[in-house]
Amino acid sequence: MDRLLVVVAEPDGPADRAARTQAAQSEAVSEAAGIQAAQVQEAQVQEAQIQAAQRRPAQVRYRLLETVRAYAAERLEEAGEARAVRDRHLGYFLGTVEESEPGLRTADQLGLLAMLDAERGNLDAALGHAVRTGQERQALRLFMARLWAWTVRGRGDEAAGWARAVRAVLGEAAPPGLELPHTLCVLLASDGPYAAPEALRVVEESGHPVALWAWIVGVRPSGGAVDHWRRALAAMRAFGDHEDPWARATGLLMGEIGEFEYGRGRARAAEGWLREALARYRALGERWGLSLALYWLSLAAENRGDAAEALALLEEAAELAGLLGGLESVPVPLMLRVRLAQLRARTGDLVGAERELTWAGEVVGRTRDLVAAARVRQAAGEVARRRGALGAARTLRGLDGVLDGVLDGVPRVCSGGGAPRPRPRPRFVRAVARAPIEGRD
């Protein structure tokens, strides 16, 4: 059942929206139950039916026991007050999330993510209520406000599930002023292979930081990956002077990832720009972009043959990802593990390499991803070669032909979904597909 009567109060602060919502909800409950709200709260606290937990300094979170919550919800339904209370609940949490959303791309990121995680039941209840009651504007606004937290936490499946739920109540035309969330919701909910040109235009012209990322990883154009990057790079020029410093840093980062993958002989120049993006993220204190920049810089260092530097960069990226919720919070988490294994092996840590591959193999076993399985086997072949088990390593040399066939339909490196990869494959995929098993026996 939805959690409805969960409130937050600041005992030492002035009355604010949380206190007003608490009072409104308590009043509705007392009217339905026929007793005074103050008496209910006093009795329940005494009997441990209301539980208080310290969430952070000067802020206490009150949670009703499930039996009490269910009883109150039933009485609200009987009194005909449930819709009004749920509407107020929706309004409060919509405001809370919209106010906190920009801070998710600042040094306040971890604290805000923790707050949103604590309110996850309330946020799901609020969004579900908006969907069930056909409140299209509120549903779109709340979906948009939650989208970046889902992205940073690596909860793409959850975002897509809510996109489908919201899409079911949307009209074909976007409500005025909500064209972007309407478009992103439709894109994420779509099972089609490609995005409509009109959807691309809305995302392209939005100027919104979240749309900037969605343009790269969630939009599937019909022209293939190279055309996608060319069009995206052109769109990103507008972010060079964006008012949001995170958007400026991310525009620079994604532009240089494009140059790194698809540019002609510009990988070394791209490394300098990646370091500039890294410096900007460090100045902001924003860990998600920092982790992504470190990942791609580690690739640049690996291309230069500096395995030790590449490993140090990649380990920092993995550590930051752990703070954000695990490796799933960064794109291509499995490749991060595989590359950690390869780099540990190349710097002499064979035990650490095998530990990384054990974890990666467990993930592949659950997902049954043939491409990922091939990459893990190749990395295992490299480790075997470095241990001196040359026979085991040689058995993997035939995998290039397998990968050539499978990778024709592999998703874009950053997205986990999207347009087929064109031939010739970018240098990143060539490195992933071949470098681990090359070298002297």
Image (tube, rainbow, N blue to C red):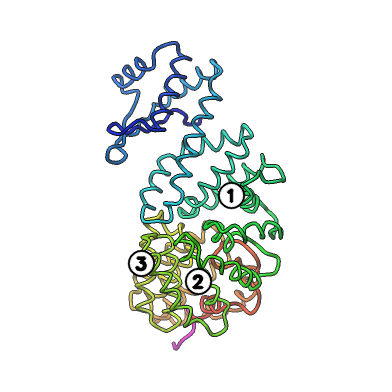
Q: Amino acid at mark 1?
A: Ala
Q: Which residues are magenta?
A: 436-441
Query: Crowding at label 1, few (<14), some or many (≥20) Cα neighbours within 10 Å?
Result: some
**SS at mark 2 in the image:** helix
Query: Label 1: which residue?
Result: 160
Magenta: main secondary structure: loop
In the image, residue 109 lies at what x, y percent?
39, 53
Q: Are marks 3 and 2 in contact (CB under 8 Å)?
A: no
Residue 408 spot, x, y in % from top left: 65, 72
> Which amino acid type is shown beneath numbered disc 2?
Arg
Earlier in the chain: of badge 1 and badge 2, it is 1
Which dot, 1 or 2, sits closer to the camera? 1
Q: Secondary structure at mark 3?
A: helix
Q: Amino acid at mark 3?
A: Glu
Q: Nearer the viewer, residue 342 or 329?
A: 329
In the image, 68 versus 347, the foreground residue is 68
Q: Is residue 52 magenta?
A: no
Residue 413, picture quadrant: bottom right
Q: Which labelled disc corresponds to residue 377?
A: 2
| Secondary structure type for disc 1 | helix
Tell me the residue at 47%/34% (across/down).
92
Residue located 67% across and 42% down the image: 170
Binning the other alpha carbons within 10 Å of mark 3 as few (below 14), some (14 to 19) or many (20 upward) gives some
Q: Which mark is residue 316?
A: 3
Extreme residue toward the top, this view: 34
Q: Which mark is residue 205?
A: none
